[in-house]
Image (cartoon, rainbow, N blue to C red):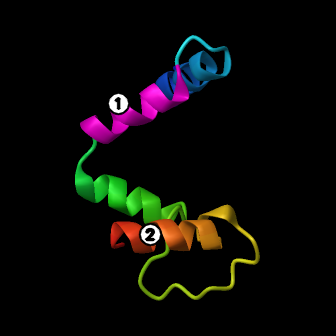
Amino acid sequence: MTDPRQYTEQLLEMIDEGILDAEHVVRCFTRYLSEDTIKNMMFAEELVPHEGYEDDTDGLFLYSQEYKDWAERKGY
Protein backbone atom coordinates (compact mmCIF):
# COMPACT_ATOMS: atom_id res chain seq x y z
CA MET A 1 0.00 0.00 0.00
CA THR A 2 1.31 3.44 -0.88
CA ASP A 3 1.70 6.21 1.66
CA PRO A 4 -1.49 8.33 1.60
CA ARG A 5 0.56 11.43 2.53
CA GLN A 6 3.39 10.80 0.06
CA TYR A 7 3.22 14.21 -1.64
CA THR A 8 2.69 16.08 1.63
CA GLU A 9 5.75 14.43 3.14
CA GLN A 10 7.78 15.02 -0.02
CA LEU A 11 6.84 18.71 -0.07
CA LEU A 12 7.71 19.18 3.61
CA GLU A 13 11.03 17.37 3.16
CA MET A 14 11.90 19.59 0.19
CA ILE A 15 11.18 22.67 2.31
CA ASP A 16 13.14 21.30 5.29
CA GLU A 17 16.13 20.52 3.07
CA GLY A 18 16.10 23.95 1.44
CA ILE A 19 15.16 22.69 -2.02
CA LEU A 20 11.97 24.77 -1.94
CA ASP A 21 11.41 28.11 -0.24
CA ALA A 22 8.53 27.97 2.28
CA GLU A 23 7.27 31.45 1.34
CA HIS A 24 7.13 30.45 -2.33
CA VAL A 25 5.15 27.31 -1.44
CA VAL A 26 2.68 29.35 0.62
CA ARG A 27 2.17 31.70 -2.31
CA CYS A 28 1.59 28.71 -4.61
CA PHE A 29 -1.07 27.37 -2.25
CA THR A 30 -2.81 30.75 -1.98
CA ARG A 31 -3.05 30.98 -5.77
CA TYR A 32 -4.23 27.38 -6.15
CA LEU A 33 -6.74 26.99 -3.29
CA SER A 34 -10.15 28.66 -3.18
CA GLU A 35 -10.75 31.68 -0.96
CA ASP A 36 -13.17 29.64 1.19
CA THR A 37 -10.60 26.88 1.69
CA ILE A 38 -7.95 29.39 2.74
CA LYS A 39 -10.39 31.15 5.10
CA ASN A 40 -11.41 27.84 6.69
CA MET A 41 -7.77 26.83 7.17
CA MET A 42 -6.92 30.18 8.76
CA PHE A 43 -9.77 29.76 11.26
CA ALA A 44 -9.14 26.06 11.89
CA GLU A 45 -5.43 26.65 12.56
CA GLU A 46 -6.24 29.75 14.62
CA LEU A 47 -4.10 31.95 12.42
CA VAL A 48 -6.69 34.73 12.78
CA PRO A 49 -9.43 35.39 15.32
CA HIS A 50 -12.90 34.38 14.17
CA GLU A 51 -16.48 34.93 15.24
CA GLY A 52 -16.87 33.97 18.86
CA TYR A 53 -13.15 34.54 19.52
CA GLU A 54 -12.32 35.66 23.03
CA ASP A 55 -8.98 37.26 23.80
CA ASP A 56 -7.62 34.58 26.15
CA THR A 57 -4.60 33.42 24.15
CA ASP A 58 -1.95 34.44 26.71
CA GLY A 59 0.84 35.65 24.49
CA LEU A 60 0.35 33.88 21.16
CA PHE A 61 1.98 36.05 18.51
CA LEU A 62 -1.05 35.87 16.26
CA TYR A 63 -3.22 37.63 18.78
CA SER A 64 -0.52 39.95 20.10
CA GLN A 65 -0.78 43.71 20.07
CA GLU A 66 1.35 43.66 16.91
CA TYR A 67 -1.28 41.49 15.17
CA LYS A 68 -4.14 43.65 16.47
CA ASP A 69 -2.44 46.84 15.23
CA TRP A 70 -1.78 45.28 11.82
CA ALA A 71 -5.38 44.03 11.50
CA GLU A 72 -6.74 47.44 12.45
CA ARG A 73 -4.54 49.21 9.87
CA LYS A 74 -5.69 46.74 7.21
CA GLY A 75 -9.36 46.95 8.21
CA TYR A 76 -9.75 43.33 9.35
Residue 55: mark in rendering: none
Magenta residues: mostly which secondary structure?
helix
Can residue 76 be seen at all in this image of the molecule?
yes
Q: Nearer the viewer, residue 74 or 20?
A: 74
Q: Which residue is mark 2?
A: 71
How far apart are the two marked residues, 1 and 2, measured between alpha carbons? 23 Å
Name which residue lies at 65% across and 71% down: 64
Which residue type carries mark 1?
Cys
Q: Position of residue 5 (x, y in %)?
A: 52, 30
Front-lying residue, 44 or 2: 44
- Magenta region, residue range: 21-32
Q: Return the x and y of residue 18 as percentages of the image width and height.
A: 63, 14
- Disc 2 is placed on an element classified as helix
Q: Is residue 27 magenta?
A: yes
Q: Using a 10 Å C-alpha cutoff, classify the residue at mark 1 as few (fewer than 14 neighbours), some (14 to 19) or many (20 or more).
A: few
| Disc number placed over residue 28 in the picture, else none | 1
| Picture quadrant where residue 50 is located | bottom left
Residue at left offset 60%, top offset 64%:
62
The front one of 2 and 21 is 21
Which of the marked residues, 1 or 2, is nearer the chain's N terminus?
1
Up-down: is 30 above or below 41? above
In the figure, 47 relative to 11: above or below?
A: below
Asked if residue 50 is among those painted magenta in the image, a careful observer would answer no
